[in-house]
Image: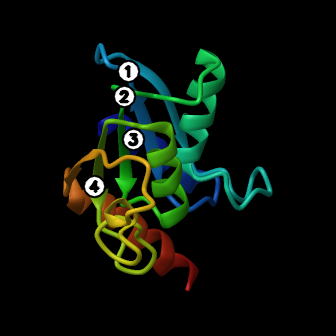
């Protein structure tokens, strides 16, 4: 989670929403890390989670990431949760809950739908205080 937090800080320094993600392979090796690039890429889908999923799938030439774990500083939104399901990521570990736009424990609860292709193991609240603080400070300075 520390690398995901570092990525979130990089995002903040680029005026992106401070969210970072790290993708770990089944052997426990860090394969990808990224942060939000929505503004920098002029792409509303350039969320940290999607960035690491895209990169690793391209690297493997495979749309499935069975056995992989995703560490992310904020609860994934519905779009990212759906991509996680499609990619068959085995485990999600996230820091802060997203009471406004979350897709796992709040909002549409993507993995509980019968249409969900896959339900990963979910671990929440890891480094929650740090992750929440990054987001609160970011928005406090901009509103």
> Which type of secondary structure does the marked residue at label 2 adopt?
loop
Q: Is residue 7 above or below residue 64?
A: below
How far apart are labels 3 and 4 at the CA level? Answer: 10 Å
Q: Sequence-wise, which precedes: disc 1 or disc 3?
A: 3
Q: Sequence-wise, which precedes: disc 2 or disc 1?
A: 1
Please identify the quarter of the rendering in which residue 137 is found.
bottom left
Q: Which mark is residue 79?
A: none
Q: Is residue 69 left or right of residue 40?
A: left
| Quadrant the C terminus occupies | bottom right
Q: Which mark is residue 25?
A: 1
> Which type of secondary structure does the marked residue at label 3 adopt?
helix
Q: Could you tell me residue 27's position as x and y percent?
A: 30, 13
* Residue for badge 2: 68
- Contact flag, marks 2 and 1 (Cβ < 8 Å): yes
* Residue for badge 3: 4
Image coloring type: rainbow
Q: Residue at x 49, y 76 (%)?
A: 139
In front: label 4 or label 2: 2
Badge 3 crowding class, 10 Å Cα cut-off, few under 14, some 14 to 19, many 20 or more, is: many
Q: Sequence-wise, which precedes: disc 2 or disc 3?
A: 3
Badge 4 crowding class, 10 Å Cα cut-off, few under 14, some 14 to 19, many 20 or more, is: many
- Contact flag, marks 3 and 4 (Cβ < 8 Å): yes
């Amino acid at each position: 989670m520390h690398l995901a937090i570092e990525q979130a800080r990089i995002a903040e320094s680029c005026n992106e929403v401070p969210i970072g993600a790290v993708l770990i392979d089944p052997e426990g090796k860090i394969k990808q890390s990224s942060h939000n690039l929505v503004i920098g890429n002029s792409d509303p889908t350039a969320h940290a989670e999607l960035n690491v999923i895209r990169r690793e799938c391209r690297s493997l030439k495979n749309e499935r990431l069975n056995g992989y774990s995703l560490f992310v500083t904020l609860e994934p939104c519905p779009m990212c949760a759906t991509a996680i399901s499609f990619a068959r990521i085995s485990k999600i570990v996230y820091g802060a809950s997203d009471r406004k736009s979350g897709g796992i424990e709040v909002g549409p609860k993507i993995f509980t739908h019968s249409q969900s292709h896959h339900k990963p193991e979910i671990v929440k609240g890891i480094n929650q205080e740090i992750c929440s603080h990054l987001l609160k400070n970011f928005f406090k300075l901009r509103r």
